[in-house]
Image: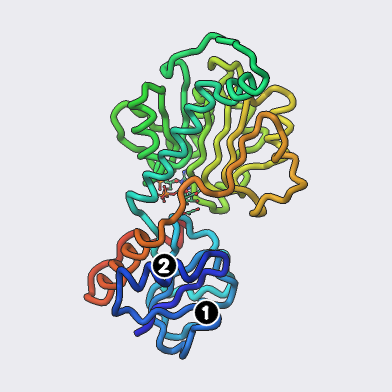
Amino acid sequence: MAFLFILPTWPIDVWTAAMRKVAPDLDVRVWPDRIGNVEDIEYCAAWLPPPGVVKSLPNLKVIMSLGAGVDAILKDPTLPGNVPIVRVNDPDLTGRMTEYIVLHVLMHHRQQRRLDENQRKKIWDSFPTHAARDLSVGIMGMGVMGADSAVRLRDLGFRVAGWSRSPKTIPGVESFAGEAEFDAFLARTDVLISLLPATPDTDGIINRGTIAKLSRNGPFGAPIVINAGRGRQHVAEDILAALDSGELHAATLDVFTPEPLPPESPLWTHPKVTITPHCAADSDPETICAYVAGNIRKHQSGEALDNLVDMSRGY
Ligand code: NAP
Ligand code: GLV
């Protein structure tokens, strides 16, 4: 039995070293040049696998995403339909995302970019501030990541609601579910966060129409958007137009289509946009390799795999 890494864009030596450390007995192979006999490979772990690579492994038993999202694996049209896919659900990854979401909600709430600008210009301007309870935060996607961020933001005093396919029961967090409740969710939301998976249903969900339905009753008079889900979920032109017209107060974007964000994108230099390079929640090699190795051991001893992707839902 062998295990294969398919990581065309990640530092492969770091990942193989981490896997050797947590699972010294595992026969670790690397696509494309250290793959050996493809018939040996029963498990693979991938991030952005090129189409056709997974199909070329005839004895594959499980495909593992090295992140929470599986969109890059599912988009391979040659993907074998009968091989289970497992995604990452790990407290380390979730904690990193929660830090990012809390950081950016607070950054907008406390107007840190305005303060930075004032410092650069040596302007002492102690403008009025507002309380966390004055800001309604709405999280699209109330899975592992969304629920954790919701609880932390609630504990800081923000008015928090979540929107997902199915309703959730989290004390102090209002729940909205499905298309029928989307407009009501938007109408109460001053800060819209996406922690949705990329699926055909969520593509382009942050568009001009969605932005127009957001609350304008918050302290800034216009809403704020934070997208740490996937780039496919926001329409960049709509965000830019809404920022320029004043329909949107500010945006934080961590994910883009395409990635890397091209230098010519106007998002880079827009004064109301904060850009981060898809780093909201990085996969830590040792932590995630331990998670992957644990799942392999479970599968080999006949136990159920953790965090299986539901192919019919696409996440
Ligand atoms: P998850 O546990 O699968 O949660 C997904 C949530 O989205 C669920 O609450 C689900 O609703 C909801 N959802 C899916 N489709 C929907 C739809 N059409 N309408 C309404 N709600 C919908 O996933 P997760 O672990 O929280 O991760 C979420 C996403 O975060 C990943 O897929 C990935 O794209 C992104 N991510 C980004 C980074 C980064 O660095 N930027 C890092 C990690 C993850 P139900 O609960 O009803 O099923
Ligand atoms: C990162 O984007 C992930 O899906 O984990």
Identify which amino acid the numbered label 2 is placed on.
Answer: Met
Q: For the point 51% across and 66% down, which residue is it?
A: 11
* Apparent side of residue 308 relative to residue 244 in the rendered image (left or right): left
The residue carrying pointer 2 sits among few (fewer than 14), some (14 to 19) or many (20 or more) residues within 10 Å by Cα, namely: many
> Are discs 2 and 1 less than 8 Å apart at CB?
no
Which part of the image, by quadrant, shows the N terminus? bottom left
* Apparent side of residue 237 relative to residue 218 in the rendered image (left or right): right
Residue 55, which numbered label? Answer: 1
Of the two numbered discs 2 and 1 on the same chain, state the one appearing first in sequence: 1
Q: For the point 64% across and 17% down, which residue is it?
A: 122
Q: For the point 62% across and 42% down, which residue is it?
A: 234
- Mark in front: 2 vs 1: 2
Residue 18 sits above or below residue 114 on the image? below
Residue 292 sits above or below residue 212 on the image? below
Give the alpha-carbon distance from disc 2 to disc 1, as whole Å: 14 Å
Residue 267: name its quadrant.
top right
Residue 260 sits above or below residue 222 on the image? below
Identify the residue position indicated by label 2 in the image: 64
Q: Residue 305 or 1: which is nearer the viewer?
A: 1
Which part of the image, by quadrant, shows the C terminus? bottom left
